[in-house]
Image (tube, grey):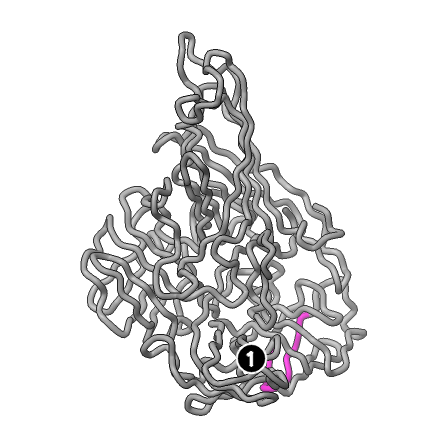
Amino acid sequence: MFPALAPSQSGWKVACTTDALAKVDNIVFADTSTANWHHGASRTVVATLANAGTTFTVTAPLAPGAGALTAADIRRPVSGTCISGGAFITAVSGNVATLSKANAASGCAAGTTVTIEHSTSRTLQDASCTGGVITSASAKFDASDVGKSVAGGPFIVGSRITAVTATTATVKIAAGTAGATVACTAPDVLQIGGAYYATATAAAPSWATNDAWSFALANNATGGQGFTCSGSILGLTATAQALLPLLSSQYVGLKVTVAGATTVNRIVTAATATSLTLNGACPTGITATAGKAAVGQPGANAPRVGNTMFQLGALLNLNPTLVSTSDDCTRNTTEGFAVIGSWENPHNPAGTALGYSATAVLGATTQPAASVGQVYIPTAVVSFAGFIRPQRTGGLTVVPAGSHFEYVMPTLPTGLSVCTTGTPAVPANATGLVFSFSPQVLTSSPAVPTGSGNVSDVTVRGLGPVSGSVNGAWKLFNGTTQVATGNLPTCAVAATTATAAFNCGIG
């Protein structure tokens, strides 16, 4: 923890060693329940925008059925060329959307691609507040805002909405702030919904209940069956239901790509808690062990495909049959190396195909039944991948118990690369591994483009506030044999600091 720099708060590093001759070829690490990995979903439309205007008109959906505006789009953030940062939809009429903030004075045109987030977490730029009441003419507060967090201005992490009218929100102010002195004068900027709370009085954040997620589904013999697809219904299996939050009407309008004997692109027209109705038939070839799907395009602030965000370090007795420049196994020496991993979204950048790297990637055929991202690790010898898997119920035990994310690497090639030859067998030294995840992508290109705006999503990984003791968990496997398991070291955290501008989580 280095709280002088915000990105340092959300980094995650796990280091371990294995006994000599112990092979480990797949792993599972459970993150703390306060950690949140990128999972935002969106759809894109083509629209006409006027300089300094307050509306946009949808002219040509990028896919059949994806462009119709409905009342469900009110309060959703939008982004695109000439759209002001933090803008969200405040009203719809046919295919015309009214925005909370005027467009830029120049640069607007017909044929502009607009990204619509399937979240109602948003930024208010005309807010005022007195005590625990926020007033905003543009906010369009409704019942779905109850439980959302409030941040910015004088509010510290943990403040949340308990009641609303169309233009006001009553806030439960987090401990450490005197409610009678909380005041902000319009036009102040506040963020609504960066976190969600299970009840109006709950102290711990919960997974979003009214945001759509972008996620991948897979059917395979090792990772499990994640979905069924028959007629025009894509259903979550029991395995996937234990991983993902329940679905909702927020998914209507999102793009879905399903790959079986062929690959088809569809649009969600209706949703239940465990299934999506598509605007066309599923492909053939979907079985319990074959088929993949991607639901939702990544949001505007999603990591770009290929953005570096991971490093794997190793210290081991490297087998010269894999890397010919290594010395003989019987010399019992160790070699050290580090490789870089990059982020892959469930959908590719165009949103028309599955996005995960699969060609000649170890582990690609055994991906989890459901995941929100892939960590792709190419090397000159062999490429392999890990996955960010949500775990709504069950999974590895974490403290405190609850929904959390897990890093799953179905094929870790240390079993291929470490020496286990000779009489007696060598090496006598252990293998050391370090898995390091950056909270933000490491790239020269902008990680969060100007005008993006889904305040409920982090770039890669973020942390919520917590007090008390928390930890994660881990399991190491060789094939299907569990080599070891346990909890990650416990972190004891003091109460959240009572400063409005800077609040700490754990890492």
Camera-side residue: 207 or 29? 29
* Residue 146 on image: x %, y %: 56, 74
* Residue 449 on image: x %, y %: 58, 67
* Residue 117 on image: x %, y %: 49, 72
Quadrant housing residue 196:
bottom right
Visible residue check, residue 2: yes
Query: How many discs appear?
Result: 1
Visible residue check, residue 34: no
Residue 131 lies left or right of residue 62; in this view the side is: right
Vertical order, 470 against 432 (above or below): below
Magenta-colored segment: predominant secondary structure: strand
Magenta region: 163-172
Residue 85 lies left or right of residue 430; in this view the side is: right
Dot 1 alpha-carbon crowd within 10 angstroms: few under 14, some 14 to 19, many 20 or more: many
Residue at screen point 57% across, 60% down? 458
Residue at screen point 77% across, 81% down? 185
Q: Outermost residue toward the top?
A: 423
Residue at screen point 71% across, 76% down? 132
Vertical order, 293 against 488 (above or below): below
Magenta includes 190? no
Camera-side residue: 37 or 374? 374
Three-letter code, disc 1 = Phe
- The residue carrying mark 1 is 88
Q: Outermost residue toward the bottom?
A: 93
Please, what secondary structure does the residue beneath circle 1 have? loop
